[in-house]
Image: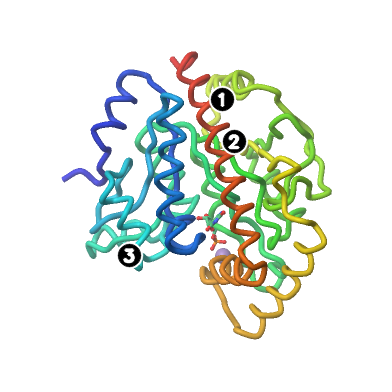
C-alpha cells in the first residue's frame, strides 16, 4: 500500500522535468466562502495550465493524501465539510479513512514528499497576536523549516503578529525573499511596515537561490513574499477598522486553536461587505502566476 497518491498528470510532469505547482486546499475549504471557493480552485488550476504548468492541488480524500486532484476531487474540497488538516493530522486521517483539507504545512509536507518544489498560497500562517500567552503559532513555520519547497505568498495575514512571525522565520533559518520589493507585505495590504533584507527581481533568480540552497545541503523551504499590486490592495483605513472588530468578535466568541484563522477570515469577509474576499482572490491569483514563473525557471535548471 502506498501512503499517498500522485495523479498521473502530476507524475508525468515530474518524470519529464516539466513545471509543477502545488496548491493548498484549506484556503478553498476553510478560507473562502462558497460558491466562490469552487470557482477559485478551478481558476487557480486554469491559470497554471495556461502557462504550461501542471497544477497539483493537494488534499486527503478518504484517508489517501492526493497530490493532484481530478475535477471531482476539486469539487469535494469545495463542497464537503472537510477537517482542516495540518501535518499532525495526516496519519490519523490515513488510518481512519477520513478526508481533510490541507493547510500550508500539510500541503508543503506532502508536496515535498512527492518531489514538487514550488507552491502557491494566499498567505502563510504564523505567530498569532497574543501568542506569548496562548502559544498559538502555526505549524506552517516549523514545517517550512524542514521541507524543501518554495512558497509564494502575500506575506502573512495581517491578523497575525507580523514582526514575531518574521523573527520565528529567522530563528528557523527559513529564507524570506521579497519579490521585486524589500517591503514585507501584509496579505490584503501591499506593505506591513517591516523590511526584508533581500529581494529578487526575476523568477530565474528565485530558481538560482533554490539551486544554491540544494548545493549547500540545506533542505529548508523558502518564502517568496509577493505583495498585492497597489491598485488591488484593500483600503488601509477600512482594513484597520474591520480587523479591530474581528479581534473583538474572536475574543467574545472565545475561539481557540485551529478555529481561529477560519473564524477571523470569515468574519472579515462579512464585516468588509465582501471587499476582503476580492483582495484575497486577487492576491492569490498573483501568487499563482508568480509561482508558475518560478516553477518554469526551476524546471529549466533543475538537475
Ligand atoms: N491563507 C489564506 N487563507 C487560508 C489560509 C491561509 O489566504 O485559509 C490557511 C492556510 O491553510 C494556512 C492556515 O496554512 O490558514 C493557517 O492556519 P493556522 O493558523 O491554524 O495554522
Ligand atoms: Mn494556530
Residue at the image position 71 percent from the left and 40 percent from the top: 229
What residue appears at the point 70 percent right and 74 percent down from the top-left corner? 247
Residue 286 location, quadrant: top right
Q: Name the mark on residue 222.
A: 2
- What label does residue 210 carry, if any? 1
Dot placed on the residue nearer the N-terminal end, 3 or 2: 3
Query: Foreground residue, 81 or 210?
Result: 81
Give above or below for 153 relative to 257.
Answer: above
Marks 2 and 1, Cα distance to the nearest angstrom?
Answer: 8 Å
**x, y (%) of residue 7?**
26, 37
Q: Is residue 264 visible?
A: yes
Q: Name which quarter of the figure residue 150 lies in.
A: top right
- Asked if residue 167 can be seen in this view, the reply is no
Q: Quadrant of residue 250?
A: bottom right
Label 3 to label 2, Cα distance in Å? 32 Å
Q: Which residue is located at x 51 percent, y 48 percent? A: 143
Dot 2 falls on a residue whose secondary structure is strand
Amino acid at each position: 500500500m502506498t501512503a499517498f497518491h500522485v495523479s498521473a498528470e502530476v507524475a508525468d510532469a515530474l518524470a519529464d522535468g516539466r513545471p509543477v505547482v502545488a496548491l493548498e486546499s484549506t484556503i478553498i475549504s476553510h478560507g473562502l466562502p462558497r460558491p466562490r471557493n469552487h470557482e477559485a480552485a478551478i481558476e487557480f488550476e486554469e491559470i497554471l495550465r495556461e502557462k504550461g504548468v501542471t497544477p497539483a492541488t493537494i488534499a486527503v480524500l478518504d484517508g489517501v493524501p492526493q497530490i493532484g486532484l481530478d475535477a471531482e476531487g476539486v469539487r469535494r474540497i469545495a463542497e464537503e465539510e472537510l477537517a482542516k488538516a495540518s501535518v499532525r493530522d495526516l496519519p490519523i486521517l490515513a488510518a481512519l479513512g477520513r478526508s481533510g483539507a490541507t493547510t500550508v504545512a500539510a500541503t508543503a509536507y506532502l508536496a515535498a514528499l512527492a518531489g514538487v518544489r514550488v507552491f502557491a498560497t494566499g498567505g502563510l500562517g504564523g505567530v498569532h497576536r497574543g501568542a506569548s500567552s496562548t502559544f498559538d503559532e502555526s505549524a506552517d513555520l516549523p514545517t517550512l523549516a524542514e521541507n524543501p519547497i518554495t512558497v509564494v505568498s502575500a506575506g502573512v495575514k495581517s491578523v497575525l503578529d507580523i514582526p514575531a512571525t518574521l523573527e520565528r522565520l529567522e530563528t528557523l533559518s527559513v529564507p524570506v525573499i521579497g519579490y521585486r520589493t524589500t517591503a514585507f507585505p501584509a496579505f490584503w495590504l501591499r506593505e506591513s511596515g517591516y523590511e526584508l533584507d533581500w529581494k529578487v527581481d526575476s523568477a530565474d533568480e528565485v530558481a538560482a537561490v533554490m539551486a544554491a540552497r540544494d548545493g549547500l545541503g540545506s533542505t529548508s523551504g523558502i518564502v517568496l513574499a509577493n505583495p498585492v499590486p497597489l491598485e488591488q490592495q484593500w483600503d488601509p483605513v477600512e482594513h484597520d477598522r474591520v480587523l479591530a472588530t474581528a479581534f473583538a468578535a474572536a475574543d467574545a466568541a472565545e475561539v481557540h486553536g485551529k478555529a481561529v484563522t477560519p473564524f477571523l477570515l470569515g468574519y472579515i469577509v462579512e464585516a468588509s461587505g465582501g471587499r476582503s474576499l476580492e483582495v484575497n482572490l486577487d492576491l492569490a491569483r498573483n501568487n499563482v502566476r508568480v509561482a508558475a514563473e518560478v516553477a518554469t525557471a526551476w524546471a529549466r535548471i533543475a538537475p
